[in-house]
Image: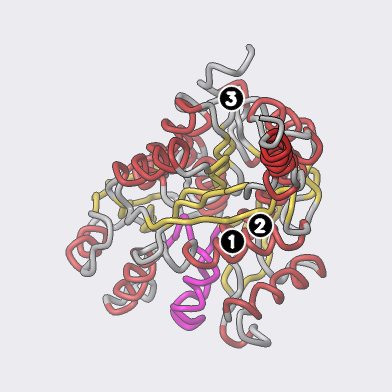
Amino acid sequence: MRARFPLFAAVFATVLAFCQAPAFAQAPLKLGLLLDMSGPYADITGQGSVTAARMAAEDFGGKVLGRPIEIVFADHQNKADLAGSIARQWFDDQGVEAILDVAASATALAANQVAKQRGKIIVMSGPGVTRLTNEDCGPFTVHYAYDNYALAKGTGVATVKAGFDSWFFITADYAFGQDLEKNTSAFIDKNGGKVLGSVRVPLNTPDFSSFLLQAQASKAKVIGLANAGADTINTIKQAAEFGIGKSGQKLAALLVFITDVNSLGLEAAQGLLLTSAFYWDMNDETRVWSRRFFEKMHKMPTMDHAGVYSSTMHYLKAVAAAGTVDAGPVMKAMKETPIHDFFAHDGRIREDGRMVHDMYLFEVKKPSESKEPWDDYKLVATIPADEAFQPLSQSTCPLVKK
């Protein structure tokens, strides 16, 4: 036994040293992105959002609390049940600590329910549905870049005030489109306009001709597009083929991204009014970051891409400040710390999870006004943070104290 004791002691010391070694404590901090990687929203989220999150992790230093930062992602294929299943696997089996974006609204609502059940942080820039900070809010849920209330108020109010006071909607037939139509209709009515009708269109529809004919027949001054991504691009292209615009009706695309305008070209998109949280060419800060993004992706970033970078950086700073990855202390730090970066100046996360910041009303330039590729917008108005988003007094979030 005396002869074996040194061997036992050596084995014990080796095990103890392994447990105390830095490598043992440095398991990666996994952060997940649930995105549309191949469908109608792939261009406005997709690989660009993965790139933005990885840029934030690299800019932060690659580690937090001694742990390497790992960005993982999955394609939810715009299926709510698949988004919920992936979120569940990530949290339960794969060690993902937080989800930092979910593209599209129905999938976001599904993933949000899982995050609430697991007590995990979920931050979203991709979806628009306002339920995320109303009846489906949670203590660790953050809605970051924009929402349908801000889009509806920015574009809807400006258009009605310009005299385009009768509307017909072409609406994506799922949570996002329905919510956007509802919010915009409320602002139209409130400002003296009138909604003459609407038509619901399945996601990823290639042929909009019958829907455009209904919109033309309504004689509405505005055809409101409550859709996004490839659906918006197809609607605008086919509207041009029908001569809509030249006949006097105006298109109002309620969610338009810089990549959509670039795909359409200024000849087709000129004159569109749109509301956005971000534009790459607003100031020196936005230009510097956007050109870094362009070097990697060969396109300028959308507001979703910029929002993912900003929210990832904000989350990592909160983890460092809290000294833990536990959701409670991290969320407390996120809500207590103002956001000052190229995406938001003096942004803040409210008790309902809404990150409030300035929004911007833009008009798409005429081809003659553009000086270089991607020089597509001119600023019409800045919508202050306290006006852009739904006031807390109207919130149905149970976390809001009234």
Q: Which residue is denoted by mark 1 in the rendering? A: 305
Inter-mark Cα distance, 1 to 3: 24 Å
Q: Give residue 153's quadrant in the image.
A: top right
* Label 1: few (<14), some (14–19) or many (≥20) C-alpha neighbours in 10 Å: many
* Label 2: few (<14), some (14–19) or many (≥20) C-alpha neighbours in 10 Å: many
Q: Does label 2 or label 3 sit earlier along the sequence?
A: 3
**262 in magenta:** yes
Determine the secondary structure under disc 2. Answer: helix
| CB within 8 Å, label 1 to label 3 | no
Q: Give residue 89's quadrant in the image.
A: top left
- Placement of the C terminus among the 4 image quadrants: top right
Q: Which residue is denoted by mark 3 in the rendering? A: 139
Q: Position of residue 125 (x, y in %)?
A: 55, 49
- The colouring scheme, among rainbow, by chain, secondary structure or one colour, is secondary structure
Q: Does label 1 or label 3 sit earlier along the sequence?
A: 3
Determine the secondary structure under disc 3. Answer: loop
- What span is colored magenta in the figure? 251-274
Q: Is residue 185 visible?
A: no
Q: Which residue is denoted by mark 2 in the rendering? A: 309
Q: Residue 93, relative to residue 133: is it above or below?
A: below
Please state if 339 lies on the left or on the right of 185 as rendered. right
- Residue name at image x 38 percent, y 57 percent: 75
